[in-house]
Image (cartoon, rainbow, N blue to C red):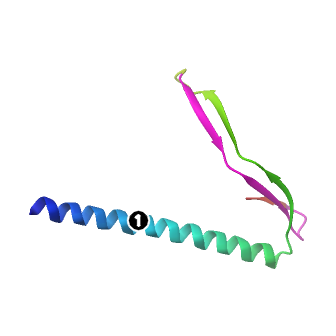
Amino acid sequence: MYMLKELLFTLTIFIFLVVGLIYLCYKDEEKFQKFLVTNNCKLISKEEGSVDIGVDSNGKLITIIGSDKKGYLCADGITYFR
């Protein structure tokens, strides 16, 4: 019975952490979208993500995954990438 309570507690904490992380990502994206509108930003470029192979400091092969990026030129003259 003790193991079941411990397992349920651990599972509950894990679920709260995952939900919290998803919420923070959503709020960050919402904040960035408001920033784009407020600063009159226009989409000027899109870069697709890539998958490359490299070598780490120990000489082992590793996979390097680059995410998609979009460039936005804003009224302040700065290009922001996201």
- Residue 14: x and y in percent read 35, 62
Q: At which x and y percent is residue 59?
A: 55, 20
Identify which residue, 11 or 35, lies in the foreground. Answer: 11
Whether residue 31 appears in magenta in the rendering, the answer is no
Residue at x-position 74% and y-position 53%? 69
Instruction: Say above or below: 72 vs 51.
Output: below
Q: Quadrant of the N terminus?
A: bottom left
Give the camera-side residue of 68 and 41.
68
What residue does disc 1 label? 17
Give the residue drawn at x 16%, y 65%: 5
Magenta span contains residue 69: yes
**Crowd tier of the residue under label 1, counting other residues whose Cα lies within 10 Å: few below 14, some 14–19, many 20 or above:** few
Q: Residue furthest top?
A: 59
Q: Position of residue 26 (x, y in %)?
A: 59, 71
* 35 w.r.t. 78: above or below: below
Q: Residue at x 29, y 63 (%)?
A: 11
**Side (left or right) of 27 relative to 4:** right
Three-letter code for the amino acid on which mark 1 is drawn: Leu
Magenta residues?
60-78
Point out residue 82 in the picture as x, y percentages from the top left corner: 73, 59
